[in-house]
Image: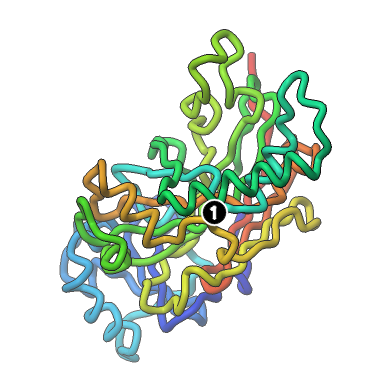
Amino acid sequence: MKPEAASALFAGPFALATLSAPGEPAFPALVTPDAQVIDVRSALGDAELTMRGVLECWDAVVPRLAALADDKAARREPLAEFRVHAPVEPRQVFQSGANYRQHVIDLHVAHRAPGDDRAEEERRAEAAEIMDRRAAEDLPYVFIGLPSAITGPYDDVVLPAWAEKPDWELELAAVIGRPAHRVPVEQALEYVAGYTIANDLTDRATVFRRDMPQVGTDWLRSKNAPGFTPLGPWIVPAASIADPGDLRLTLKLNGGTMQDESTKDMLFDVARMVSYASRTARLLPGDLVLTGSPAGNGMHWGRFLRDGDVMDGAISGLGAQRTRCVAEVTS
């Protein structure tokens, strides 16, 4: 799929993307709000530069990027002439589950344990109490995803033949711009270069192991098929996002709104997520911290992804992505 003109809009004077011309390798690009492209390699004098390389020297390079966006003499080309890829190839992907209050309550109600005949209101109250306790104890739920699951924001998503209940999960993703280890919450946003959009697809039928329920969740199987994480289209610098805790996420399926929520509903904001992940791991430039998905996924609606479905995901200030689902062709 190709980006539409309207989806090129984002907050701030510029965003970053990874693009390619037909038959040419991908390159890091600066994109302006009027859908014009400047090749960052040429502008910064490094023919081998990648987006990860840009992020590895983020503090030094961001003033040069800002000046480049204002440079009327810089060579610009129409965005429409290029293919838009995932904006960065991360080394690590940190994913968050159970981070939107209403979403978690809905899932708690949907996953009724055998023999639990309590009224829905009672089980909702129980879930709300659990969420309040987690937030007070500062215990986000973070796990690891595979970079190989990432695909572009307009690429088709292949639904594996084995996936019985593939589901959408639109998420705000923070892009790391400085190595971060044991970072306090108060400083965590200083390590975020920018933000992008992720759709963290999940096959609900394989989240829990059927052969051995005692081991719990199986995120490898349920989340990491090739193309299960459409990413982008842009990295919007953090300086252009006034408040990542007040952004609107919307996902439409074939034109109908499925998810529509603010990041205000997050139990743990971006700073707490980044800080928490850094307690254990060393976050690296270009890494992604996915911050969870709001209520309104397929589990809630009783409707899962199938061949031909089109997902439109948008986050205020970050643009929009459009992906079409296609069934895996098996011999």
Looking at the image, can residue 319 be seen? yes
Residue at x 58% of width, y 22% of height: 208
Q: In which quarter of the image is residue 19?
A: bottom left
Q: Quadrant of residue 257?
A: bottom right
Q: Depth check: 250 or 104 in front?
A: 104
Say which residue appears at 50% left-offset and 68% top-offset: 245
* Quarter-of-image position of residue 308: top right
In the image, residue 209 sits, relative to residue 155, either above or below, namely above
Residue 52 at what x, y percent from top left?
A: 26, 55
Locate residue 277 relative to residue 244 in the image: left or right: left
- Near mark 1 (Cα within 10 A), the count class, few <14, some 14-19 or many ≥20, is many
x, y percentage for residue 226?
Answer: 49, 33
Amino acid type at mark 1: Glu
Question: Which quarter of the image is occupied by the C terminus?
Answer: top right
Vertical relation: 275 (above or below) 40: above
Residue toward you, 154 or 181: 181
Q: Name the residue under label 1.
A: 171
Residue 20 visible in the snapshot: no
Please state the horizontal and vertical placement of residue 327, each as a whole percent of the image: 68, 30
Percent x, y for residue 89?
A: 34, 48
User: What colour-coding does the image apply?
Assistant: rainbow
Name the residue at 40% across, 57% down.
Answer: 87
